[in-house]
Image (cartoon, rainbow, N blue to C red):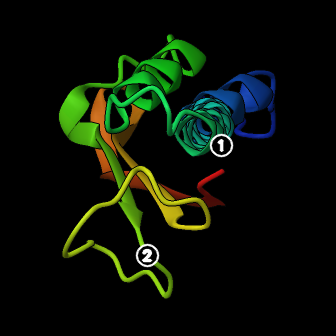
Amino acid sequence: MRRIQLQREDGQGVVEFAVVLPLLMAILLGIVQFGIIFNNYATFADASRVAARRAATSRFVGDSGASARTAAKNAASNLNLTDPEIDIQSCAPPATYPCATQNWTTPGDEVTVKLTYPYDIKILDWIVTSGNLNVVTKERLE
């Protein structure tokens, strides 16, 4: 009778790698997705700042924030912002959001820019989580 020897471990490393590889790939893809969302947030926050500054300095233009919307879209051109995602208001201090009445002509009033942008964290095309990035920036009307 022949005896089977089970002491050889030639393929052990390959089997362990095959078991651990999906977990490592999921973690790597999660890190990449987080980096993309963080980049989007930084771009988004800058677009909010640019829009607030444009709205604060354009009180003589008379467009009620339209030029600030355009400035936000231009600053975040890779995010495809739409008009419903950009809310710009001008209120007398102390400002509460949303404003009851808007005034774009009085210096010292507060301009509030609120941007909202949806995000999804996907790993291998499975949505892990989703939500909205929200940024609010306030400036004084000049």
Residue toward you, 32 or 37: 37
Mark 1 sits on what residue?
Answer: 49
Q: CA distance from mark 2 to mark 1?
A: 20 Å
Numbered tag placed on residue 85 in the rendering: none
- Could you tell me which quadrant the N terminus lies in? top right
Question: Which amino acid, by three-letter code, is at mark 1?
Answer: Arg
Mark 2 sits on what residue?
Answer: 92
Whether residue 43 is visible, yes or no, is yes
In the rendered image of this protein, does residue 10 appear above or below residue 52? above
Which of marks 1 and 2 precedes in the sequence?
1
Callout 1: 10 Å neighbours few (<14), some, many (20+)? many
Q: Position of residue 21 (x, y in %)?
A: 62, 30
Q: How many marks?
A: 2
Whether residue 27 is visible, yes or no, is no
Residue toward you, 70 or 63: 63
Question: Which amino acid, by three-letter code, is at mark 2?
Answer: Ala
The residue at 27%/40% (across/down) is 85
In the rendered image of this protein, does residue 14 appear above or below residue 86? above
Q: Looking at this rendering, what residue extends furthest in the bottom direction?
A: 94
Q: Position of residue 84 (x, y in %)?
A: 19, 38
Secondary element type, mark 1: helix
The residue at 50%/58% (across/down) is 111
